[in-house]
Image (spheres, helix red, strand yellow):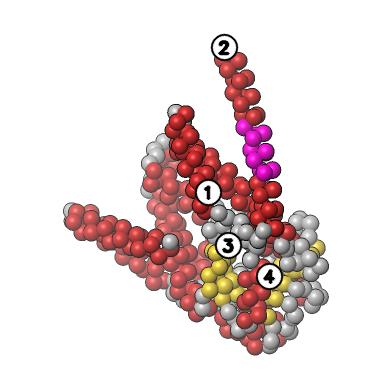
Amino acid sequence: MDLNKLRDRLSEIDRQLVEFVAERQSIVEEIGTLKRSEQRPTRDFSREKRVLDGARAQAEALGVSPKLAESLMRLLIQSSLTNQEQARVRAEGHGTGRAALVIGGSGQMGRWFSKFLDSQGFDVTIADPAPSDSGYRYLADWREAEDNFAVTVISAPISITADILSQLAEHPRQGLILDIGSLKSPLTDNLRAVAATGSKITSLHPMFGPDTELLSGRHVIFMDAGSKQALEEAKHLFSSTMAIQIDMELEDHDRLIAYVLGLSHALNVAFFTALAESGEAAPNLSKLSSTTFDAQLAVAELVAQDNPHLYFEIQKLNPYGLAPLEELSKAVQRIAQMVESGDEEAFAQLMKRGKEYLGKREQARG
């Protein structure tokens, strides 16, 4: 059999694979409908394990890489979960016949919340000085919007959010008000002031990016700003998803986020800055690869493509932000001293301590 005929056979198999994926997706939709009717959770971890174990066993019996089979099935499972979650959000939507306003709806997270609320049946209006091509009703100035929104999401830079909250404290609005800022210390007083007017306001922090489709395994932090009713209504908006809901005090948020966001951002900025200033041209480094380097590079590339002004705001406006940066600097200096002095034992102890800490972290998570 010649090369062209072999390629034709391969193309036919590829076509059949896509057809099987489409058939699988159709069955998944039926399963999702049945789960909702029987009030079953979207995700079944024991079922997923059986599917993955079965795929690995079958692959091994057929002489196929079990790792390849597992990767393929994980991709299909993720696609299935995404479709089921989105279908459940639409089916159990809480916004039918109600209006929602997204202040800053032209921004990345503003667009995410606009789509999220729209999928629940809300009639979405975007208010943003930047024009929007989303197809939703649009206003350049949120203050021109009528006071008839069941939900208002504030998705704006922190300094602008503080100003919006200040105006809401002077001119209260009905409906649920959500602040989704990455920091809370610059907003806490204003959040409390709005709540003191009797407004239903609460604060949350979605710990995921605007490209996120599946919320399973993703965290959303909820903080009471002075209105228990607002807090419960905000949680209810995510009740149809598989997001992990975390309760946190407003005063604790920024101290922890200084490590979760501030430290990780700084680490990656330092990483690609060291590469950029190393004198090694990108074409030279692109020829080299290692598991650790490639993994770190992939994360650093995502950070480098993000909004630098937002990243600086997260560093600058967090009153706890400098401590992790100082600790990072000290850690790098310690490593350099160990290498320079040839202290292998101290280096090994440093790695051992890190391994123990990370192990405890995994135990705490699961």
Q: Earlier in the sequence, mark 1 or mark 4?
A: 1
Say if residue 131 shows up in the picture.
no
Q: Which mark is residue 161?
A: none
Q: Which mark is residue 243?
A: 3
Q: Position of residue 159 (x, y in %)?
A: 60, 74
**Disc 4 to disc 3, C-alpha distance:** 18 Å
Q: Residue, x 60% and y 15% (percent of image)? A: 5
Q: Residue, x 61% and y 51% (percent of image)? A: 81
Closer to the camera in the image, 316 or 151: 151
Indicate whether 143 appears above or below 48.
below
Mark 4 or mark 3, whichever is nearer to me:
3
Label 1 is placed on what type of residue? Glu
Q: Is residue 19 rendered magenta in the image?
A: yes
Q: Position of residue 341 (x, y in %)?
A: 18, 56
Q: Give the extent of the magenta segment.
A: 17-27
Q: Position of residue 155 (x, y in %)?
A: 65, 68
Task: Estimate how packed mark 3 is, as few (under 14), some (14 to 19) or many (20 or more) residues with alpha carbons within 10 Å.
Answer: some
Q: Residue, x 46% and y 60% (percent of image)? A: 265
Secondary structure type for disc 2: loop
Q: Kindly identify which residue carries mark 2.
A: 2
Q: Earlier in the sequence, mark 3 or mark 2?
A: 2
Report if the CB atoms under discs 1 and 3 are less than 8 Å apart: no
Q: Kindly identify which residue carries mark 1.
A: 48
Q: Kindly identify which residue carries mark 4.
A: 153
Report if the CB atoms under discs 1 and 2 are less than 8 Å apart: no
Secondary structure type for disc 1: helix
Q: Residue, x 48% and y 64% (percent of image)? A: 261
Q: Is residue 272 rendered magenta in the image?
A: no
